[in-house]
Amino acid sequence: TGNYSQVDKLWSILPVLYAWIPVVVNGDGSDFDERTLLMAVLASIWGIRLTYNFCRRGGYQWPPWNGDEDYRWSYIQRGDFLPILAKPVAWAVFNLLFI
């Protein structure tokens, strides 16, 4: 479809869930570490902010495949931040190595 917004939607939610796994599921049976809890809280704050901003810009819609891509990708693909990325070969290399 050319609409990669599904990845953008998950990018703001899944890291928060992954950050809480070590806090909730402690494999060795000991109490959780305060630093792990702090990192989970910070990741949650980041995820809430990211999810809010993505939602505010139309990223979450129903049905889910109708949502918009992160607005920053169009700037990057046009070469506004790094002009070489406007070239198709450079964009393909960027996609291969970065994404």
Image: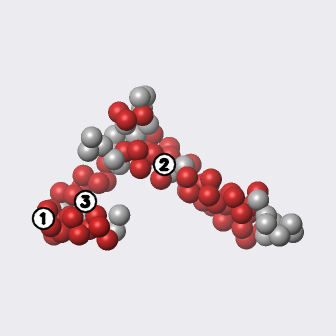
From the top left corner, tell me how far across and down residue 25 is, in percent.
76, 59
Using the image, determine if residue 22 lies above or below residue 13.
below
The answer to whether residue 62 is seen in the rendering is yes
Give the distance between the C-alpha atoms of the residues marked 3 and 2, in whole angstroms: 20 Å
| Tag of residue 10 | 2
From the top left corner, tell me how far across and down residue 66 is, in percent.
35, 33
Q: Nearer the viewer, residue 25 or 20?
A: 25
Q: Nearer the viewer, residue 36 or 52?
A: 36
In the picture, measured across the screen, residue 98 lies left or right of residue 17, that is left
Q: Amino acid at mark 2?
A: Leu
Question: Quadrant location of residue 63?
Answer: top left
Q: Indicate the secondary structure of the residue bearing disc 1.
A: loop
Q: Quadrant of the C terminus?
A: bottom left
| Tag of residue 87 | 1
Q: Amino acid at mark 1?
A: Lys
**At 79% across and 66% down in the image, what residue appears?**
27
Q: How is the image coloured?
A: secondary structure
Instruction: Give the class, few, some or many, for how many residues have Cα within 10 Å of label 3's Cα (few <14, many ≥20).
Output: some
**At 79% across and 64% down in the image, what residue appears?**
26
**At 87% across and 69% down in the image, what residue appears?**
30
Q: Amino acid at mark 3?
A: Ile
**At 24% across and 52% down in the image, what residue appears?**
74
Using the image, determine if residue 1 lies above or below residue 46.
above
- Which residue does the numbered mark 3 point to in the structure image? 76
Instruction: Give the class, few, some or many, for how many residues have Cα within 10 Å of label 2's Cα (few <14, many ≥20).
Output: few
From the top left corner, tell me how far across and down residue 37 is, in percent.
73, 63
Give the distance between the C-alpha atoms of the residues marked 1 and 2, in whole angstroms: 28 Å
Question: Quadrant location of residue 56?
Answer: top left
Using the image, determine if residue 31 lies above or below residue 75.
below
Q: List the single residue furthest toward the top.
A: 62
Give the distance between the C-alpha atoms of the residues marked 3 and 1, in whole angstroms: 11 Å
Front position among marks 3 and 2: 2
